């Protein structure tokens, strides 16, 4: 029996890497559903090659155009609810690789329909980790990490007792502006911010890596995935991006996960778990890799990391507000409406001024997300004139 996969965000960076993995194992994997937001041409090519039964186009207007109607699938779902409906289709695993908190409803729907979820889309877990993980426990379905750091941690702790974990060390490359002082970052352009030194990724996560917000989001992601307290998770700057993360145990032993900077490795592991399958990708050559270095992060140069940890500490709806404000600010930065250094200002103001719900339900999280976005948009309308 082949593993039947529904892939959300198939036209993105993770989506394309996932399809490369699937392409290499036609006897092992079958694509039964693909979802994209706006890149209908790419989705059409993917449908022609992988022959899924169903597809979804999230952008309602584009979904009604001729190219979309020409998609060769039995069922085409349209609009923001389309991805949610798609995950109800018969499948073994849903690979969530869309970007942003918009992934929350489809991820919850996938879990509630009893499917394993391979999660690249970290924002829903940041905003609503309590909901997602409690639903996964209730349904008895695993949430498998795809993010390279979390896949590394997952692999280091498999077979270990949680009480034996002393500290999780998340590695961070430091992004393109590592060692640059904050004053020199003022006129940074979206292209500069998106050119990551070691990973080739989508635009939003690349900018998050440049502000180090990505590492902050990953701390919250790790708290939920591994049921770990904030104090048990540390960040270490490792510019070579070869050690994907480390776990230190109570007896002083440290297990590290090493690998090439290629997302196909963690994607493949999430899709074949608990098995390991010989990978055709280029391997790490231990004797020719650079010296591995580790350093402490500088919280003063990268306030987003501090802010994410503050949101994690506050809990409740604070992480949802942080995430919503950050998504809004990054979008404004990419559109040239906000200077790079003001991304953290928007997030900080939202975190301080938007009221956070204490009770966590789907509705309160959606409200916190909407309030965070509203606040950030108003703040940017005033701040953006300084670009
Ligand atoms: N890239 C990486 O190496 C990497 C590593 C670890 C984790 N992640 C996480 O994986 C997720 C995807 O990252 P990425 O780099 O692959 O992003 P990306 O290249 O920007 O791709 C995003 C995908 O999501 C779709 N999409 C956009 N808005 C959507 C919406 N509102 N609803 C549903 N789908 C939507 C896009 O469709 P269209 O293109 O058709 O508009 C595209 O397929 C992010 O959460 C990121 O943090 C990425």
Image (cartoon, rainbow, N blue to C red):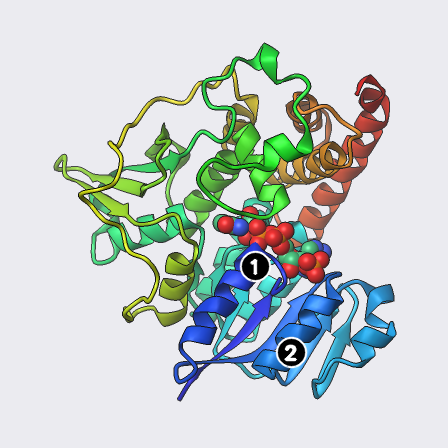
Q: Nearer the viewer, residue 191 or 64?
A: 191
Specify the quadrant of the image occupied by residue 40: bottom right
Circle 1 SS class: loop
Q: Quick one: quadrant of the N terminus?
A: bottom left
Q: Nearer the viewer, residue 103 or 202?
A: 202
Residue at 26%, 51% in the rendered image? 157
Q: Residue at x 71, y 42 (%)?
A: 368
Image vertical order of residue 299 relative to residue 282, above or below:
above
Q: Where is 36 relative to 33, above or below?
A: above
The quadrant of the rendering that contains the C terminus is top right
Residue at the location (50% across, 29% down)? 309
Looking at the picture, tell me which residue is in the foreground, 111 or 187.
187
Q: Determine whether the residue tagged by mark 2 lies in a helix, strand or loop.
A: helix
Instruction: Give the quarter the ligand 1 occupies.
Output: bottom right
Residue 154 at x, y percent in the picture: 32, 53
Q: Which residue is mark 1?
A: 97
Tell me residue 63's x, y (percent).
82, 70
Q: Which residue position holds label 2?
A: 47
Q: Percent x, y for residue 164?
A: 20, 44
Q: Residues within 10 Å of mark 1 (few under 14, many from 20)?
A: many
The residue at label 1 has a CB less than 8 Å from ligand 1: yes
């Amino acid at each position: 029996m082949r593993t039947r996969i529904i892939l959300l965000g198939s036209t993105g960076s993770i989506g394309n890497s996932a399809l490369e993995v699937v392409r290499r194992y036609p006897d092992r994997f079958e694509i039964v559903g693909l979802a994209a937001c706006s890149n209908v041409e790419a989705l059409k090519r993917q449908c022609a090659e992988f022959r899924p039964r169903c597809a979804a186009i999230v952008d309602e207007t584009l979904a009604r155009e001729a190219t979309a109607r020409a998609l060769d699938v039995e069922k085409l779902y349209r609009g923001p609810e389309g991805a949610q409906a798609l995950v109800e289709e018969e499948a073994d695993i849903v690979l969530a690789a869309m970007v942003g908190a918009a992934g929350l409803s489809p991820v919850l729907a996938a879990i509630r329909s009893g499917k394993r979820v391979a999660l690249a889309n970290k924002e829903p877990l940041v905003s609503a980790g309590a909901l997602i993980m409690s639903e996964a426990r209730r349904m008895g379905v695993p949430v498998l990490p795809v993010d390279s750091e979390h896949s590394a941690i997952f692999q280091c702790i498999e077979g270990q007792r949680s009480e034996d974990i002393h500290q999780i060390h998340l590695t961070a490359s430091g992004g393109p502006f590592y060692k640059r002082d904050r004053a020199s970052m003022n006129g940074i352009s979206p292209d500069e911010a998106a050119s990551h030194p070691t990973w080739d990724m989508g635009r939003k996560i690349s900018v998050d890596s440049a502000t180090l917000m990505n590492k902050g989001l990953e701390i919250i992601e790790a708290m939920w995935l591994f049921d770990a307290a904030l104090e048990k998770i540390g960040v270490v700057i490792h510019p070579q991006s070869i050690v994907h993360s480390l776990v230190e145990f109570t007896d002083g032993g440290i297990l590290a996960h090493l690998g090439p900077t290629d997302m196909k490795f963690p994607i493949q592991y999430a899709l074949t778990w608990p098995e390991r399958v010989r990978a055709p990708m280029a391997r790490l050559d231990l004797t020719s890799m650079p010296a591995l270095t580790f350093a402490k992060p500088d919280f003063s140069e990268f306030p987003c990391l501090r802010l994410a940890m503050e949101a994690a500490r506050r809990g409740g709806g604070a992480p949802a507000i942080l995430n919503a404000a950050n998504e809004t600010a990054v979008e404004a930065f990419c559109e040239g409406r906000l200077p790079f250094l003001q991304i953290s200002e928007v997030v900080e103001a939202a975190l301080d001024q938007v009221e956070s719900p204490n009770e966590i339900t789907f509705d309160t999280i959606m409200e916190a997300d909407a309030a965070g976005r509203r606040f950030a948009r108003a703040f940017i309308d005033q701040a953006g004139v300084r670009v």
